[in-house]
Amino acid sequence: MRPDCPHGPLPGARMTRIDPLSILMGLAFALMWSSAFTSARMIVLDAPPLYSLSLRFLLSGLIGVGIALALGQSWRLTPAQWWATGLFGLCQNALYLGLNFVAMQWIEASVAAIIASTLPLCVALAGWLLLGDRLRPVAIAGLVAGFAGVVVIMGARWGGGIDPLGLALCVLGVLALTVATLSLRGASSGGNVMMIVGLQMLIGAVILLPPAMAFETLQVTWTPRLVLAFLYTTLIPGLAATWVWFRLVGRIGMVRGAAFHFLNPFFGVAIAALLLSEGLGLGDLIGVAIIMAGILAVQLSKAAPEATEAAPPSPPSPRAGGG
């Protein structure tokens, strides 16, 4: 990164190695993203999920846009940024998080976190099957190992009565998040990062409100747990984690940034066990370890080619790369 460029690398630039600040940003993102499942589970125990999520997006979006305006950022996004921001707001916020919030009425936070943690595997697989990306043998082995880890965990949990509808909604959610991730490069270039974060939150709020009004009853059980969980998920996973993710991708690129997702299975299961006393068996630990190894293999196999890239493709061409 150029020393005279305080806001990160120039558009299209690539760093040759992960610097200490990037490592801290990646760890912070993984921790915040993983904690969102536990806070979401707390919310849906006392409030309707879609109403709660729509309100969260509204507040996060207004705060994000306000901060962006205070920083002098502009509403005038490029056409590629508007396209990617709208798609990201639809797929990540409305579909991925909406489906997960609904699902967590019936399944544990740790299950949702484990399924969502397969994002880098899904992105790599989609790039291979749909975009013609070449995968090295170690990446293919990582894909197989990662999904095998999910099977190990789900097999152990199935005997405990995991809800099939909740599981299906989480799977659909991670597929939507895969589409959102593929759209991220167009949104993360060209500046105005906080404005983009705020706008995609507002898009999610608008999209989720009609189904909330159609299918939910606005009945809330006010508890300290609900209030604290709602404030936390609005400000930390909702706003701070998204901002950190955009900045991380801008510093080190999509593939290296996504490598930090290999920590999400561990963080997600550990936080749920600590705060919600969710069960943690030997099968869970083995499956989490296999998933982490698979994700890491996929990302490390792609890190070297990306380091030699001169510039990313022109947006909105999708490329692989959070909750």
Image: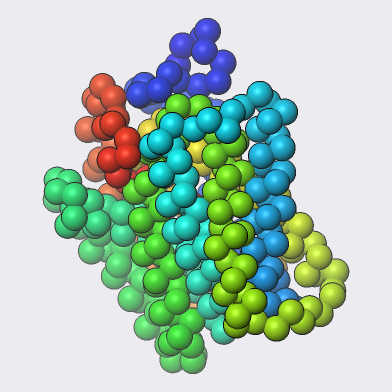
Of residue 162 and residue 281, the one placed in the foreground of this image is 162
The structure residue drawn at horizontal position 44% and vertical position 58%, both measured from the top left corner, is 91
Colour mode of the rendering: rainbow
User: Can you say whether 14 is above or below 255 in the image?
Assistant: above
The structure residue drawn at horizontal position 50% and vertical position 27%, both measured from the top left corner, is 191
Position in image of residue 113 (x %, y %): 50, 66
Of residue 279 and residue 16, the one placed in the foreground of this image is 16
In the displayed structure image, the side of residue 232 where residue 311 appears, left or right: left
Quadrant position of residue 50: bottom right
Position in image of residue 42 (x %, y %): 70, 72
Position in image of residue 284 (x %, y %): 45, 73
The structure residue drawn at horizontal position 34% and vertical position 69%, both measured from the top left corner, is 149
Count of numbered circles on the image: 0
Of residue 249 and residue 183, the one placed in the foreground of this image is 183
Position in image of residue 59 (x %, y %): 72, 53
Of residue 10 and residue 149, the one placed in the foreground of this image is 10
Q: Can residue 94 be seen in this view?
A: yes
Query: Considering the image in quadrants, where does the C terminus appear?
Result: bottom right
Q: Can residue 289 be seen in this view?
A: no
In the displayed structure image, the side of residue 3 where residue 252 appears, left or right: left
Query: Considering the image in quadrants, where does the N terminus appear?
Result: top left
Quadrant position of residue 254: top left
